[in-house]
Image: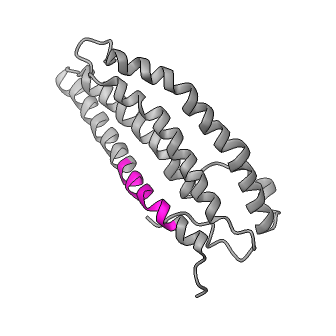
Amino acid sequence: MARESARLRLARRLEAPFRALGWLCGACVLAVVLLTFALVAMRYGAGRGSIAAQELVLHLNAVAFMLGGAWTLLRDGHVRVDVLQQRWSPRTRARVELAGLLFLLLPFCAVLFWTSLDYVAASWRLREASREVGGLPGLYLVKALIPVSALLLASAGLVRGLRLDFAGEGRERRAGPTA
């Protein structure tokens, strides 16, 4: 086995926290499924509902979605157009992916981060909570995940860029972090 390059060692160290993020997102999705089942059972079995539980489902789903994007990018689970890519050499694929990271993903993350700051700050100033009677407090905490998700997605994009294989030696460098 060839010695791992410094670039790949750095990528491996930087992606370690993302594994915990993946587990957190998985736990949120499982909680959404179980809580939704419980809500349906309560509604049709006992004729009762819970606004707070319904909002908790939405909040957990928001956490999984906003934080899961970074994990998905590292795992190479994002959507891409393979019609063209399958015909390209590994070197060309790496160059196109790097261009996409630099000119599409990172600017998107910067705009998302920058434009969300006032929105999130206003929510924190108000200590925004649910508008529904019996709803959950702390909506501002969920909204705070918007700029956090932009930073995490940009970080994942940078780690992904470190893993790109410009030499065309194989796909093992393109593989995301191990579960």
- Residue extent of the magenta highlight: 12-24
- Above or below for 165 versus 147: below
- Name the residue at 33% across, 12% down: 131
Q: Position of residue 138 (x, y in %)?
A: 30, 25
Q: Position of residue 26 (x, y in %)?
A: 38, 50
Asked if residue 139 lies left or right of residue 3, the reply is left
| The N terminus - image quarter | bottom right
Q: Position of residue 109 (x, y in %)?
A: 60, 38
Asked if residue 60 lies left or right of residue 95, the reply is left
- Name the residue at 48% across, 60% down: 15
User: In the rendered structure, does residue 14 fall within the stretch colored magenta?
Assistant: yes
Q: Is residue 76 visible?
A: no
Asked if residue 96 lies left or right of residue 129, the reply is right
Asked if residue 117 lies left or right of residue 54, the reply is right
Q: Nearer the viewer, residue 25 or 109?
A: 109
- Name the residue at 62% across, 65% down: 163
- Above or below for 121 versus 82: above
Which of the colour schemes (rainbow, by chain, secondary structure, one colour) is used? one colour
Q: Nearer the viewer, residue 80 or 117?
A: 117
Residue 126 sits in quarter = top left
Q: Is residue 154 visible?
A: yes
Q: Position of residue 169 (x, y in %)?
A: 72, 77
